[in-house]
Image (cartoon, rainbow, N blue to C red):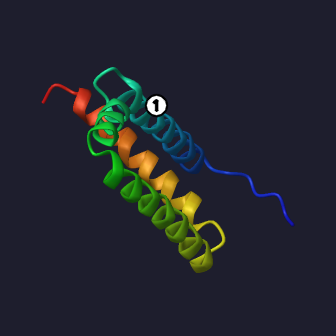
Amino acid sequence: MEFRDKGLFESTTWVLLRALQYIGILSIAWNLLKPTGWLSFLIELLAANRPTSYYYLGAGALMLLGGKSWLDSLGPNAASNLVAAGGGFAGSYFVLRLLPL
């Protein structure tokens, strides 16, 4: 294996992608955990529709596991690449939403 020096553009792009991913992860976590967030909504929904919601929750978990195994069968890091792309998209959406346009 040979060492290859990264150029300025490639290094800047890598830092920008990582920053957008972390901003996206933090914004998703904030929207999940804030008092009126997705997690409190999901808990209220599960409590309101008790017997049926457990089946939907179990089916959703099985579909997530099946989707992850299917993505990993397509490529070795397909699931993690999809999560990275989703985090980058969420980060850029969060930054664009903050801009006064």
Q: Is residue 32 above or below residue 73?
A: above
Horizontal and vertical percent for residue 2? 85, 64
Q: Nearer the viewer, residue 39 or 52?
A: 52
Q: Please state if 55 lies on the left or on the right of 36 as rendered.
A: right
Amino acid type indicated by mark 1: Leu
Q: Please state if 25 lies on the left or on the right of 77 as rendered.
A: left
Furthest toward the right, the residue is 1
Furthest toward the bottom, the residue is 74
Horizontal and vertical percent for residue 35? 33, 20
* Residue at 47 percent of width and 37 percent of height: 25
Q: Please state if 78 lies on the left or on the right of 33 as rendered.
A: right
Mark 1 highlights which residue? 26
Q: Please state if 2 lies on the left or on the right of 101 as rendered.
A: right
Helix, strand or loop under label 1 = helix
Q: Nearer the viewer, residue 76 or 53?
A: 53
* Residue at 55 percent of width and 60 percent of height: 81
The quadrant where residue 1 appears: bottom right
Which of the image's four quarters has the C terminus? top left
